[in-house]
Amino acid sequence: LGERDSFVGRKVLITAGPTQEPIDPVRYVGNRSSGRMGYAIAQAAWRRGAEVSLVSGPSALAAPWGVEFVPVATALEMRDAVASRLGDADVSVYAAAVADFRPVEPKDRKVKRTESGPELSVELEANPDIALETRRQRRAGSIAVGFALETDDLLENAKLKLEGKGFQLLVANDATEEGAGFGVSTNRVTILGADGSVDVLPLLSKDEVAEEILDRVEALLDASVKDETPGG
Ligand code: CTP
């Protein structure tokens, strides 16, 4: 049913959506990620013939057709789901907006207004950096794609994330720009390559951005196959 078969036989692992870190059974620390960008990549990779696993934080979107859908809530659950699948993946895409901090001691009962008084402090601790922590588990020759959402110094910060987290491609977007970032169906991105390339793309739908990303992943996969070919 796919439009092309360039990813047949390839396994693609994608993280998407926000994570929700419980404060108590009904409240959480989270962010406004909708999951759209990661879901668009999952569907587009499936259309190209890939075997896709989508590890998703809570999202209102329907699971994409044909993919292994792995719903998670917290960053720790997302980390475990990624760690157990990454060794098989030819491509890993880190599109999730992982909450950087979680409450140290989530309460097992709802915090009552009368108990907390006029102020409530919630102590937070850092969550693991999933892309960084699982980096060594990536398959040799696999392609890792990260995202960077920035409000200032877009390119400098994006370059640091590309190198620091060992991505082959980094999709950077400016959260302050209209039509880009969280909660909208469009995105204006700049795609950086580990080879130093910088592609500034126009305002596109997230589905179109997904195709742009996969075109570049496809080229890198073809190049890494050639590298492995004796004499190639
Ligand atoms: N990422 C991750 N685990 C985290 C935080 C981020 O896997 N705990 C991944 C994201 O999915 C993305 C990339 O790392 O591909 C960069 O995420 P971003 O939120 O832009 O950056 P942070 O590393 O969290 O840095 P900061 O929030 O300080 O900009």
Image (tube, helix red, strand yellow):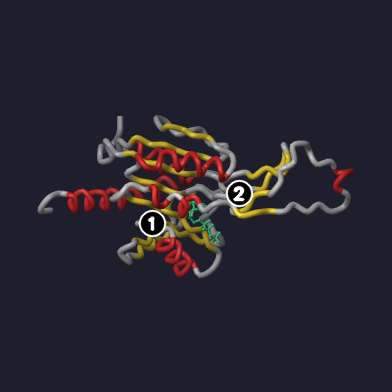
At 44% from the left and 49% from the top, the residue drawn is 134
Image position of 43 with respect to 148: above or below: above
Q: Distance between the residues labelled 2 and 1?
A: 24 Å
- SS for dot 1: loop
Q: Residue beneath label 2, please?
A: 32
**Local crowd size for mark 1, using a 10 Å CA cut-off: few (<14), some (14–19), many (≥20):** many
**Disc 1, ligand 1: is the CB inside 8 Å?**
yes
Q: Residue beneath label 1, please?
A: 167
Pick out the residue farthest to the front: 136
**Local crowd size for mark 2, using a 10 Å CA cut-off: few (<14), some (14–19), many (≥20):** few
Pick out the residue farthest to the left: 231
At 62% from the left and 49% from the top, the residue drawn is 31
Could you tell me residue 77's position as x and y percent? Answer: 55, 40
- SS for dot 2: loop
The answer to which quarter of the image holds residue 50 is top left
77 or 178, nearer to the observer: 77
Comparing labels 2 and 1, the label whose residue is closer to the camera: 1
Q: Which mark is residue 74?
A: none
Could you tell me residue 100's position as x and y percent? Answer: 59, 54
Could you tell me residue 71's position as x and y percent? Answer: 53, 35
Image position of 61 with respect to 173: above or below: above
